[in-house]
Amino acid sequence: MEGVLPMTELGTYLKEQREALGVSLEQIQTTTKIQKRYIVAIEEGNYDQLPGAFYARAFIKTYAEALGLDVDEVFTTYKRDLPEPEAQPVVELSRRATYSKSSAPKKSVAKRWIPNIIIIVLIFAIGTALYYGLQTFLDGNEEAKTSAPKQNDVTIDQGDAPSKETDAPAKTEEEPKEEPAKQEETKEEPKKEPKKEALAAKSTSGQDVTYEVATKDTMSVSIQIKKDASPSPFVGVRDTSLEGKALAPDHINASDPNPIVVKDAKTDLIRIRIGSIKGIDKIVVNDQELKLNRSLLVQNIYLKKVATP
């Protein structure tokens, strides 16, 4: 059909990754600040609808980062689907702009050195005046010291001076009092509870990773996202499955609540959908941290409640 462009492999791949994460076009628009019609144009390979090849490549890069993909790998794999960068126009300079400074008339040597000579003479004259002024001030101080009269020596008769041995009151030596020995208080240090080992995954199948949580009560979950994660990962927490009830608002932007907390969930199975595991710092379930599999970029983490032994 005339006017309809076939979808490129790159556009198809990005659309499949977005749908696998369960992210809508509106959510991608909110995360990347790219208009929805441009995102649709990228997925359909209709780059003519984008404002130039430069913006097309930038939009594709931002879109891939929002999905938690490796941008370099995507650009290498789908190189032939990327729009070619636009050639920058060559601007010719006018004769006036290319005018060389060397063609300007040079000032004579005398005109260039006369101001410098005047400044040097002024500095020398000021320095000489300051030197002679300081010498005059110092000579005046020396004359004032030599003209001052000397004081007469006064001899004090020590016959009437009180004797230190007879007049001084007798001192009684007091024996130092012994201070009672302080009883050393022995404080018992509080016993530290042993740190729980990280909970390892029970099974892994594709993007699905299952952990078994031994408890007969409810499950509480805390998902800590790295503050410097770029882009901020997509995180969704639901009861049982994709169609289940949301236990917490989806995390899409860095401004969303962090950490994501679910308290006392009355369910036997919790699913945590993570778009980019590299942006997750840690996940704690019932005060026990999970041992995360960092090799899977996109994951469905299932928390399965099992009876305590």
Image (tube, rainbow, N blue to C red):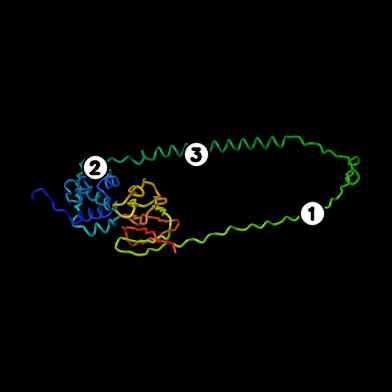
Please report whichever mark, 3 or 2, sits nearer to the chain's N-terminal start: 2
Q: Is residue 235 visible?
A: no
> Taking 88 as reference, is 126 left or right?
right
| Residue type pointed to by label 3 | Phe
The amino acid on which the numbered mark 1 sits, given as a three-letter code, is Glu
Near-viewer residue (65 or 215): 215
Q: Where is residue 12 shown, x and y percent of the image?
A: 20, 55
Q: Between tags 1 and 2, which lies in front?
A: 1
Q: In this figure, which residue is indicated by the disc labeled 1?
A: 178
CA distance separating discs 3 and 2: 42 Å
Q: Position of residue 46 (x, y in %)?
A: 16, 49
First of labels 1, 2 by sequence position: 2
Closer to the chain start, of discs 3 and 1, is 3
- Residue 178, compared with residue 117, is above or below; it is below
User: How far is the residue under mark 3 from the one under mark 1?
Assistant: 77 Å
Query: Image quadrant for the C terminus?
Result: bottom left
Residue 124: give its label: 3
Mark 1, other Cα within 10 Å: few <14 / some 14–19 / many ≥20: few
Kindly identify the amino acid type of the residue bearing the numbered disc 2: Tyr
Q: Secondary structure at mark 1?
A: loop
Residue 248 coordinates in the image, percent (x, y): 36, 48
Q: Which residue is disc 2 drawn over?
A: 99
Q: Quick one: SS at disc 2?
A: loop
Where disc 3 sits, the SS reads helix
